[in-house]
Image (cartoon, grey):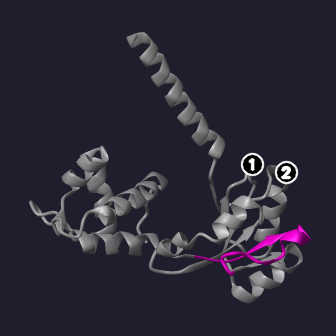
């Protein structure tokens, strides 16, 4: 696989989402210039990103849209299903367990695990919620390599350590906690507090501008 930065990796799904949203009766081709303009991004950056994942671009014509979609999906591994499990079967964990949209991105969430006996059983989605005592056994039997953490912050590192001991190589962390992991383990954290801070700051700035205009 070609070397690619994390910032580029984060932009590729944005391109993919836009390309898939173009009406079927639209043009079969799209240029990097048009894509950049539609997404309010720099044309040079978009051109470089697309060149990393596809060789299908043609001068003055652009990329065949369906082929570009396939190239991006293949590069991101969306065409290869990856099995995952969730640690923490609270409201967020159960919501993620039942979310069918992950399949579009090559992610197959097999089960969730929790210490609360009251949650053990079958979820509304039909997928199992199992006791944490069965985690090691499940990982070994199913060769799971992706773990999703949705436990409270104080339990996140413990959950992380246990997942790594089970052979998990990549962790999607929803707990508001920095996780210490070995160098060969990838952690992608979703910091909801940081996202909310950005939204709140934007709203406060807009309110101040509105006051100044009155």
Determine contact: label 2, label 1, CB under 8 Å.
yes
The answer to if 109 sits in the magenta stretch is yes
Q: CA distance from mark 2 to mark 1?
A: 8 Å
Residue at 54% over, 28% down: 201
Q: Nearer the viewer, residue 168 or 94?
A: 94
Side of 104 relative to 15 (left or right)? right
Residue 119, horizontal then vertical, whole percent: 83, 70
Residue 154: mark in rendering: 2
Q: Can you give x and y, in whole percent of width and height, for residue 51 in the image?
A: 28, 62
Task: State the residue in front, 131 or 169.
Answer: 131
Q: Is residue 121 magenta?
A: yes
The spot of residue 137 in percent (x, y) is 82, 84
Give, as a single range, the part of the protein colored magenta. Answer: 108-126
Say if 172 sits above or below 211 in the image: below
Give x and y (percent) for residue 56. 22, 71
The single residue placed furthest to the bottom in the displayed view is 141
Which label was assigned to residue 198?
none
Q: Of the two numbered discs 2 and 1 on the same chain, state the one appearing first in sequence.
A: 2
Viewport quadrant of the C terminus: top left
Q: Secondary structure at mark 1?
A: loop
What residue lies at 88% left-to-right and 70% top-to-bottom? 118
Give the residue at the far left of this rendering.
60
Q: Quadrant of residue 96?
A: bottom right
Asked if residue 192 shows in the view, the reply is yes
User: Callout 2: helix, strand or loop?
Assistant: helix
| Residue 191 drawn above or below residue 210 | below
User: Circle 2: is it few (<14), some (14-19), or many (20+) Cα within 10 Å?
Assistant: few
| Residue 66 position by quadrant | bottom left
Residue at position x 30%, y 43% in the image: 40
State the residue position of label 1. Answer: 177
């Amino acid at each position: 696989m070609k070397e690619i930065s994390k910032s580029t990796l984060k932009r590729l799904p944005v391109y993919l989402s836009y390309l898939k949203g173009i009406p079927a009766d639209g043009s079969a081709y799209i240029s990097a210039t048009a894509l950049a303009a539609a997404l309010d991004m720099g044309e040079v950056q978009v051109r470089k990103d697309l060149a990393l994942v596809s060789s299908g671009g043609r001068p003055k014509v652009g990329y065949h849209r369906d082929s570009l979609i396939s190239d991006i999906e293949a590069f991101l591994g969306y065409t290869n299903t990856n099995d995952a499990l969730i640690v923490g079967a609270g409201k967020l964990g159960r919501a993620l367990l039942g979310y069918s949209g992950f399949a579009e991105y090559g992610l197959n969430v097999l089960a969730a695990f929790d210490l609360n006996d009251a949650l053990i059983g079958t979820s509304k989605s039909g997928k199992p919620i199992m006791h944490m005592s069965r985690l090691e056994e499940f990982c070994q039997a199913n060769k799971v390599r992706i773990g999703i953490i949705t436990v409270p912050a104080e339990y996140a590192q413990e959950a992380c350590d246990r997942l790594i001991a089970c052979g998990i190589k990549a962790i999607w962390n929803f707990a508001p906690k920095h996780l210490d992991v070995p160098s060969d383990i990838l952690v992608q954290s979703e910091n909801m507090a940081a996202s909310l801070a950005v939204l709140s700051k934007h709203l406060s700035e807009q309110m101040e501008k509105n006051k100044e205009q009155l």
